[in-house]
Amino acid sequence: MVRILKILVFIFVIVLFYTCKQNKTTQIPINEFFKAPQKFAFKISPDGKYVSYLKNYNKKQNIFIKSLEDGKEITATSFSDFSVRGDYMWTYDNQILFGQDKDHDENQLSVLDVNTLQTKPVLTLPQGKVKVNIMNRNRFTPDVITIRMNKRDSANFDVYRLNIKTGELKTYLLNPGNITEFFVDADGKIRLIKATDGVDETILYRANDRAPFRAIIKNNFRNYVRPIAFTGDKENFYALSNVGRDKTAFVEINAADGKEGQVIYANKTTDVKNVDYNKIKHRLEFVSWEEAKPMRKFYDAD
């Protein structure tokens, strides 16, 4: 009996040893979690022929362009002094507008001609106080880009139109200090804004650039409306809203009067969390929410 017990103990130890050995995993070095990604900020050209991305070259982030036809990759920029920021943008005539933070002294926007791979600066500003964000482009005036900048008032961002060929900068919309978000239509015109008084939010609309903004929706601790984008149909825009319901739904709102039209998606048990709208192609792609796991409803077959 003692001998049998010893044999059983021996077998148990052997099995335990091999089980532990098989379950042993390789320890991942801590520095792996802090490495920069090999490629990121992927963007497709408006003509659908190229995909661009940022990649480390000369120890800095540079723009690379890959042909979707033959897979050939080219090094579009080769900066060794300052990295390219991730908010770069393709224009409708195959140019790329990109920014660089120049050693905390300057904030520079430059344009890259994809055909010649030549770059030229179009806007240089003091980096310490002035911040620039690229907002959107216009298909009908491909040389003119809309940007946000706190040049006039460091605490508030105004909207400007920048001609990337001439460098001409024109004020488009001044922020009186209470505007928190701007929303553009398919033509790149700002027709919807969100403002706050520190407690409540107001959504304002204007029919065109010459008309004044007027309030159409009030947000408070009970009501919540978050605009997403204009639908491209009349004055309607997509939004997340809990007005008149227990859960946040994805709806369509008429900007002319602020009234809700159709409910595009609603869930009886949970809030709709996010809407993915492709601003380049002007189409709704999916909505997402969480139940026992993250869920999505797609509106585009691609």
Image (spheres, rainbow, N blue to C red):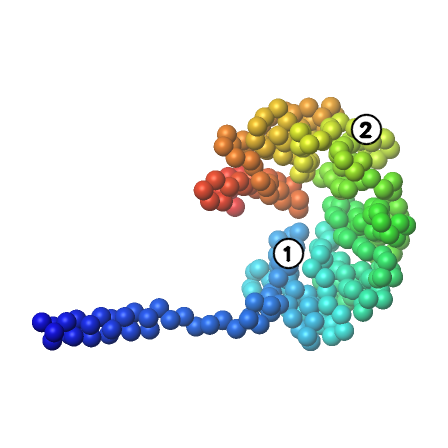
Pick the quarter of the image with the N terminus: bottom left
Q: In this view, does 165 lie above or below 292?
A: below
Could you tell me residue 174's position as x and y percent?
A: 87, 42
Q: Which of 134 and 106 is in front in this view?
A: 106
Asked if residue 207 shows in the view, the reply is no
Query: Which residue sits at x=82%, y=66%?
Result: 104
Marks 1/2: CA–CA distance: 36 Å
Secondary structure of the residue carrying tag 2 is strand
Query: Which residue sits at x=20%, y=75%?
Result: 10
- Judging by the rendered image, the residue that carries numbered circle 2 is 214
Q: Residues within 10 Å of mark 2 (few under 14, many from 20)?
A: some
Tell me which amino acid carries mark 1: Lys
Q: How many marks?
A: 2
Q: Is residue 126 left or right of residue 259?
A: right
Query: Which residue sits at x=64%, y=56%?
Result: 43
Q: Which of marks 1 and 2 is in front?
A: 2
- Judging by the rendered image, the residue that carries numbered circle 1 is 43
Residue 140 falls in image quadrant? top right
Q: Nearer the viewer, residue 100 or 195?
A: 195
Q: Most extreme residue toward the left, as rendered?
A: 1
Tell me which amino acid carries mark 2: Arg
Secondary structure of the residue carrying tag 1 is strand
Could you tell me residue 217's position as x and y percent?
A: 73, 28
Asked if residue 155 shows in the view, the reply is yes
Q: In this view, does 171 lie above or below 120?
A: above
Q: Is residue 75 left or right of residue 3?
A: right
Could you tell me residue 88's position as x and y percent?
A: 72, 57
